[in-house]
Every structure is written in structure tokens, then in C-alpha cells.
Image: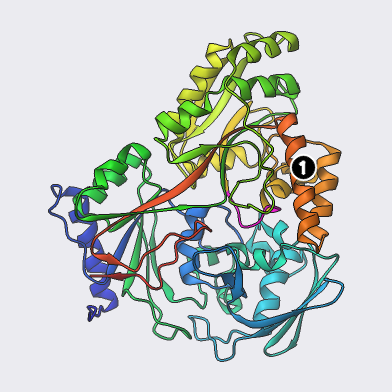
Amino acid sequence: MKLVKWTRRGLFAAVGAAMAVGSFALPGVAQTPPGVLVVGQIAEPKSLDPAAVTAVNDFRILVNIYEGLTRYKPGTLEVEPGLAESWTISDDGTEYTFKLRPGVKFQDGTDFNAEAVKFNFDRMLDESHPYANTGPFPLSFFFSAVQKTTAVDDLTVKFKLNAPYAPFLSNLAYPTGLIVSPAAVAKYGKEFGRHPVGTGPFKFDEWKSNERVVVSRNDAYWGKKAGTDAVVFRPITDANTRVAEMLSGGIDMMVEVPPTSLAEFSKGGFKIAQQAGPHVWFLILNAKSGPFADKRVRQAANYAVNKGAITNDVLEGTADIAAGPTPPAFAWAYNNDLKPYPYDPEKARALLKEAGAEGAELTFYVTEGGSGMLDPIAMGTAIQADLAAVGLKVKIETFEWNTFLGKVNPGLEGKADMAEMAWMTNDPDTLPYLALRTDAWPDKGGFNSGYYSNPKVDALLEKARTSTDQAERARLYKEMQVIVHDDAPWVFVANWKQNAVTSDRVQNFALEPSFLLQLQNVVKN
């Protein structure tokens, strides 16, 4: 099929027309332009700087503009070469040397080389770097083991680690490791997140706040050229509106389809994609102050919430009940002996009485929607009812996704007793290390918003990430899961099977276990 070629002016005109038609046409009437893929996103991106964001919603755009030294092999979480052609690891596991792909250029025409790689990691990790002020970089934790980055020659870069670090190659493939243009950072400074420049198959064209982000095919791309002329990412925060837009033809693709709406796309004209992945949906409990500072109250909440009803009735079978902090998608590290907390309201009441927490008043932060959050308002309401049934008085406060993150990520102390959260991770180290360690409390730069602390868990996580023996890592993670399950810093709710729907005009699309949205090979008729 020959795709329509667009001038920049023609592309934006077509995009604007598509949005107008999608917004106001009757079902079945709208028609988005050929060669332009319109994607319904769940929220407005926070930034288009990969080092500065944490949400999969943003990452789904970024992986089409940027690339990393490594990447995930399609359909897996296995690492394969990306901007690096190959690498070697020292015998002691503390030096990684990468041979870079020659002839690669950033979308602004500047060269991708070892100095560019060094710039990227120094910007994240060195507070004295001249562009460290373009942060903050909340997931620089991923690379905290990096002691020094050296440009050995133009196409060779070496990372010296302070200790062996098993997830390093996987973390390089994660969006936080995507490589940005140093020249663009120097040009735009703190505004770089509004003017992204990478080496990927699509280049940035436009970001109109709360309306669209537009990227177009990078014809100078070093690899296989993208199959569409452009991709338009539209933030449509209300799930019902996203569904209506999809049904009417105003968008060509939507991710995270509400479970109650999946049946609407089973008829002709649509294709549904599903893919299991490393996801966990949970409630953060404030373990530092308030009722949940008592482990018995945290355990009571786990017994009180009817997770089976949530996964079957609210999520309509699109998720399984979670047993702990590690998703079962990490089969080698998952503790199969761990069972979910059973639904036992009587046990919950007994624990609350023993802890003197009967009738406790709780503030519960709920989001309207966001990355991996499933059906958060319906789930939050169901949880509120379950906790009320055992005598807890729960007040829900609801926020838009980025506002929600701005309240939850800095910590719940003085604000709330519990909050919804979802993580989609690339390694069994990621979530517990960033959200369960004592040194990951928000005031220390991490995402342990509930202030959970257990020295045994800290020690197990530190040891697991430095072990070069996967069997030993697995043993340590499984032991960690047992302790965390008993301590109950979270209410463990669900492991989701992600989904997406496309129109039948979209070809070559597949969901990835990483939950990222790789659109390079997609063709839109």
C-alpha cells in the first residue's frame, strides 16, 4: 500500500479535521486520515523528557521518539541490542563496555556517539553537571549503581558500577534509559521536555496542551522506516469518552479499554489485543502515622477488601487477584507458595478490635484514570464499601492523574491514609526497590509513599540486586515477598492483563509485555 505523503501544514490540517470529526460526528461516520494513526491516550503527558517522567502513559509516546542502548526483544522482556551493537561485562560484574551503532544521528542532525551517552547519564546522576537543573529525574534510581561513565572513543562507552548490578541491562532498555540529544538539551534547557529530540523512528512535531502530541516519520532514521506518516496522541481522560471516540471513528486505537466496554468492540470493524505483563494494582497504606501504622490494621484492610469481586465484577475477568508485590509475570522470581489474603470480613473486624481501630476515619486518594489504573473510580468505590462493612469510615478524594501523582509521590503523611497505585515494571527488582525500601521514602528521593520500613526487606533487596546468580536472586525475592505479604504495607489487589483496541484499518499492531506502545511497524490504511 502506498501511504499518503503529508506536508507539515497538510498534516496538521488533517489532524485538526480528524479531531473535529471525531468529536462531533455520529457513530460510524468519522474517518481519520489515511497514513495518520490517532491514538487515544489516558492522560495528558507530564513531559516528553524520558529522564524526567515516571508514567507509562508518557513512556508510550517516548519510545517512538527515542531509543536506548538496549531494547526489549519484541514480545518479551529479554534484552537485545539497540543503539549499542554489542557489549561486554567484566568478570567481577562492575564494568559494562558498549560498542555503539555507527552513523546514527539525532533528529536535529547532530551525531549520536559516546559523548552523547555520557552526557545523558551524567545529566541524571551528577548534581554538578551543567544541565542537572533540567530535572528532577525521579527514576535515576535505576542507575544509582553507575559510578562513572567514560567515552572511551567515539563509538565506545564504558560504565563503571559501584557493585555488580543484575538489572542494569534491563534498566537501560526501560524508558528512563532512552538517549536524548545533548544539543537539544543545551538549546532548550528546562523546556527540553516540550521540545524532545531523539534518534527514533518518529520525530516530534507539535504538542498542543490537553489536545494532542503529534510525531511524524523520521525519514533519516538509521533503521527500518516507520509504517505511518504520523501518529497523533490525544489525551482523553474520561474512559467513556475514549470508548465513544473509538466507536465513532474519531480515534484509531485506544489502550486500557474499560473491562465493561470490551464487548462493544467484539463486533466487526475492530480488533482487540490482550497481553499479560508485569503489572500490580495496589493500595498504598500510610504505615508511618494514623491507623495503618499498626500492622494489624493493614492486615485487616487486606482481609476486608473483596478482591475476587473486584477482579470478576468490576474488571470482568481482565485481571487476577494479586498475592504480593511481585507480579507473577516474573515467573523465575515469583513465590508460587504465596497466596492472596482471603476475603474474610470477620477476621478483619477481629484485627481492628484488637488494634483498637474500630470506627477509624480514613482519607482515600483515588484517581480519575492513569497508567495501569484499570477502572480506578469503580474500584475505589468498591473498596470504600468493603472497608465500611467492617466499620472503617472512608472519605474518598478524587484527582486527575498528574495532580494525583503530585499528591501521592511526595508521600501521604499529613494528607491521606491510603491511595490507589499501579506499577508496570521491567524487572522484579524495580518496584520493591523503588517503593518498599526505607531509603526509598519520598524525602530520600524514592516512591515509598507509605513510609514502609523493614530492615530485613532492605537487606534482601540490596543483596538481590548485586547477585550475579539468578537462582540466588530468585531465592532472595521470594523471601522478600513472604515478609512483605505479612507486613501488608499495601492492600494487594490485582494483576492486570493489558488490552487495546484498534480499528480494522490498523495493521501490524501488537501489545508488548513491557506495556510500551511500539508503533514503528504499524500501518494505517
Position of 144 with respect to 259 (left or right) is right
Count the labels in the image.
1
95 relative to 480, above or below: below
Q: Does the magenta stretch mainly form a helix, a strand or a loop?
A: loop
Look at 62% across and 36% down and name the residue there: 323
Task: Residue at the far front: name it.
Answer: 337
453 relative to 265, above or below: above
- The reply to whether residue 481 is in sight is yes
Look at 77% across and 42% down and name the residue there: 480
**Magenta stretch: residue 160 in it?**
no
Residue neighbourhood size for the residue with mark 1, other residues' Cα within 10 Å, grouped as few (<14), some (14–19), many (≥20)? many
Task: Return the x and y of residue 337 as percentages of the image width and height.
Answer: 69, 38
What colour scheme has been applied to the protein in the rendered image? rainbow
Query: Of residues 202 and 49, which is closer to you in this image?
Result: 202
Task: Return the x and y of residue 518 as percentages of the image width and height.
Answer: 44, 66
Q: Quadrant of residue 511?
A: bottom left
- The reply to whether residue 130 is in sight is no
Q: Amino acid at mark 1?
A: Met
Query: Of residues 247 and 306, which is closer to you in this image?
Result: 306
Query: Of residues 521 and 316, which is closer to you in this image?
Result: 316
Which residue is identified by label 1? 480
Looking at the rendered image, the quarter that the N terminus falls into is: bottom left
User: Mark 1: which secondary structure?
Assistant: helix
Position of 198 with respect to 171 (left or right) is left
Task: Return the x and y of residue 178 as percentages of the image width and height.
Answer: 59, 69
Range of magenta residues: 424-429
Task: Return the x and y of residue 152 as percentages of the image width and height.
Answer: 76, 87
Q: Quadrant of residue 452?
A: top right
440 relative to 174, above or below: above
